[in-house]
Structure formats: C-alpha cells, structure tokens
Amino acid sequence: MATDRRRPYLRIAEDIRRDIASGRYAVGERLPVARELADRYGVAMMTIGNALAVLRDEGLIETRQGAGSFVSRAPDDETAGPTPGEHSEEFRIISEQLSEIRQHVQKLTVRLDELDARTRPDQAEK
C-alpha cells in the first residue's frame, strides 16, 4: 500500500469531504467538535483548524463562533478538486515556501560575494 505523502490537514480535509459526499454528515448538520476530530485523527488542534479552513474555503462548511462547524453543501464534481489551470492549496503553500527560499538564497549569494571580495588575497595587497 502506498504512503499518502500529503500534509495531514489535507488528508483530514479529504476524509471529511468524503464523509459529507457520502451523506455521513448531511447539509445543515454540525461536524464533531475540533477536540473530538483531533483525538480521532491523533493530531494537534491546529491541524484540525487547517483542515476545516480548507473545507470552509471550498464552501463545504461554515463555522459559527461558539456553535461549531456546519455542513453548508455537499461537494460536487466541479468542486471536488482543482480545475485545470487552478492549483491545490498544498501546491500554493509549497510555491510560497519555494519563493521564500529563493529570496533567502539570493541574499546569501550577495553576502558571500561581498565576503569573497573582502577576503581575496589579490584585494588584500592593494
């Protein structure tokens, strides 16, 4: 069996999305509280919060302060995954992280070039 390498919150969001699609959680029904979901999946509350945020962004659930998260609609084929040309949440996060890494590498390259220029033996004789 292949290992699922997606981030835990994305796997949990997919699980809950599947449960909504199958009717386990009906439209209008409240999802289990975050603590219960965290215990069920063996993850931190923040991970559950991230999974619920994905479902909220997809319009599948809505969260009401002090009342919990409720199913607002069932997923359909058009919203089950990214459309062509649209990227998943995980892709977006990885792209942002890669961009940050590139910026750091560029800054380090400039600093190394400056240090190299100051420490070259031919520069020290002048």
Image (cartoon, rainbow, N blue to C red):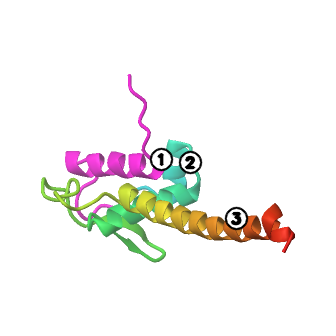
> Is the residue 70 above or below the residue 64 in the image?
above
> 62 or 10: nearer the eye?
10
Q: Assign a secondary structure to mark 2.
A: loop
> Is the residue 126 above or below the residue 78 in the image?
below
Find disc 1 in the rendering and name its residue.
8
Find disc 2 in the rendering and name its residue.
43
**Residue interval drawn in magenta:** 1-29
The picture quadrant where one finds residue 28 is bottom left
Q: Nearer the viewer, mark 3 or mark 2?
A: 3
Find disc 3 in the rendering and name its residue.
112
Mark toward the start of the polypeptide (3 vs 2): 2
Query: Where does the image place residue 122, in percent across and percent down from the top left?
Result: 79, 65
Rounded to the nearest angstrom, the CA distance separating label 3 from label 1 is: 38 Å
The reply to whether dot 2 and dot 1 touch (C-beta < 8 Å) is yes
Q: Assign a secondary structure to mark 3.
A: helix
Residue appearing at x 14%, y 55% in the figure: 76
Quadrant showing the C terminus: bottom right
Mark toward the start of the polypeptide (2 vs 1): 1
In the image, farthest residue toward the right:
125
> 86 or 118: nearer the eye?
118
Q: In the rendered structure, which amino acid carries the disc numbered 1?
A: Pro
Rounded to the nearest angstrom, the CA distance separating label 2 from label 1 is: 8 Å
